[in-house]
Structures are given as structure tokens and as C-alpha cells.
């Protein structure tokens, strides 16, 4: 059985306000229950993973290719920022973006919405994401970027 150690996903405006975006953290109990606590547009939502951790990890395998990457679209100013930290078993995925997105970003969001019933955030606009994907430049994160994620 796989074990999720950390799941943190934030997607905010350029000033890191979450009132129109996402913030999340995983909560685990001594008894082994796991729940991802989300704020979507500042309203709380839970994804209960108890008994579904293996399934969730399998579903999010697409994130593994994002590790140590920063996705930037320098053609947009004052847009959105996102960060993801997902640690399970011996796998760590840390990625971030500034107005840029990995090509699987919509697939990731659709999975959270359709399979795990997470509502959409006001910040979420598929046209913006698709346009961002086309102009995204990908750079490798340095070791200093990886050593102290702000969340």
C-alpha cells in the first residue's frame, strides 16, 4: 500500500491571494485516514483519500514529469502563480509556474473535478490555460529553489 506524505497545491493570482483560487494541504491521522483539505475560492472542500491513496497516486502519475520544473509565460504580467508539492513513498514532485503550465495541467484539473468532485475555482479559465501552455517556457529548478519551497 502506497502512502502519501505531502500534497500541497496552490494556484493564486499574482499577489498570492487565494480568494479566487486553490490552496490545499493533506491531513493524516494516527489511524491512517488521509484527507486533502482544499480551499476553493476561500470555501472549504475535502477529498477523502482513506482507502483510495493507491488510486490517487496512480491517477496523479502524470505529475511525475513535472518534477524540478518551472513553467513560465513571460508574455503575461500580473496573471497567476501556482505551486505543487506531492510526496509519496520515495517519490517527490515539486513544480511551479508563473502564467505558464505543463501540457497536462488541464488533465490534472479535470481529474480533480470529475473524479474527486473538487469544484472549479474562479481563477480557472481553460482558454487562459491553453494560451499559457502555448507560450510556456520550461526551466529546471535549481537546488536552492528545491530546498525551501515557501509552503
Image (cartoon, rainbow, N blue to C red):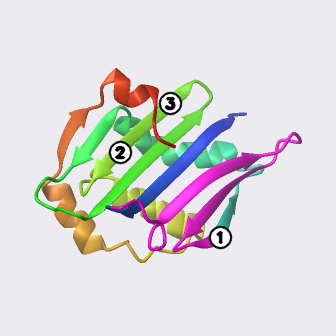
- Say if mark 1 contacts mark 2, CB within 8 Å: no
Disc 1 and disc 2: Cα gap in Å? 23 Å
Residue 29 vs 146, above or below: the answer is: below
Disc 3 to disc 2: CB gap under 8 Å: no
Quarter of the image with the N terminus is top right
Task: Tell which residue pokes out farthest to the right in this image.
Answer: 31
At numbered mark 2, what does the secondary structure look like: helix, strand or loop? strand
Segment colored magenta: 15-44
Distance from the alpha carbon under mark 3 to that under mark 2: 14 Å
Mark closest to the chain's N terminus, 1 or 2: 1
Is 66 covered by the magenta stretch? no
Residue extending furthest toward the bottom? 122
Q: Is residue 127 left or right of residue 125?
A: left
Q: CA distance from mark 3 to mark 1?
A: 26 Å
Q: Which circle, 3 or 1, is nearer the viewer?
A: 1
Of the image marks 3 and 1, the number of the one nearer the N terminus: 1
Q: Secondary structure at mark 3?
A: strand
**What residue do we see at 13% from left, 53% from top?**
74
Name the spot of residue 148 as percent of width and height, x first.
46, 31
Residue 54 in the image: state x and y as whole percent: 66, 42
- Residue 44 numbered mark, or none: 1
Q: Residue at x 25, y 46 (%)?
A: 71
Percent across and percent down for residue 52 are: 70, 50
Quadrant hosting residue 132: bottom left
Give the residue drawn at x 42%, y 44%: 62
The residue that disc 2 covers is: 96
- The spot of residue 26 in percent (x, y) is 66, 49
Question: Mark number for residue 92?
Answer: 3
Circle 1 packing at 10 Å, graded few (<14), some (14-19), many (20+), is few
Tell whether 134 sits left or right of 96.
Answer: left
Residue 116's place in the image compared with 97, above or below, is below
129 is higher (above) or lower (below) than 141:
below
Amino acid at each position: 500500500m502506497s502512502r502519501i506524505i505531502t500534497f500541497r497545491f496552490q494556484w493564486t493570482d499574482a499577489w498570492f491571494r487565494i480568494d479566487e483560487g486553490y490552496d490545499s494541504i493533506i491531513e493524516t491521522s494516527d489511524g491512517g485516514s488521509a484527507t486533502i483539505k482544499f480551499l476553493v475560492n476561500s470555501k472549504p472542500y475535502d477529498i477523502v483519500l482513506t482507502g483510495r491513496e493507491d488510486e490517487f497516486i496512480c491517477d496523479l502519475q502524470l505529475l511525475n514529469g513535472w518534477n524540478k520544473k518551472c513553467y513560465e509565460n513571460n508574455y503575461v504580467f500580473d496573471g497567476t502563480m501556482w505551486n505543487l508539492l506531492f510526496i509519496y513513498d520515495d517519490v517527490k514532485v515539486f513544480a511551479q509556474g508563473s502564467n505558464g503550465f505543463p501540457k497536462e495541467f488541464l488533465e490534472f484539473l479535470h481529474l480533480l473535478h470529475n473524479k474527486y468532485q473538487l469544484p472549479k475555482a474562479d481563477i480557472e479559465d481553460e482558454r487562459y490555460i491553453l494560451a499559457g501552455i502555448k507560450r510556456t517556457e520550461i526551466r529546471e529548478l535549481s537546488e536552492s529553489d528545491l530546498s525551501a519551497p515557501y509552503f
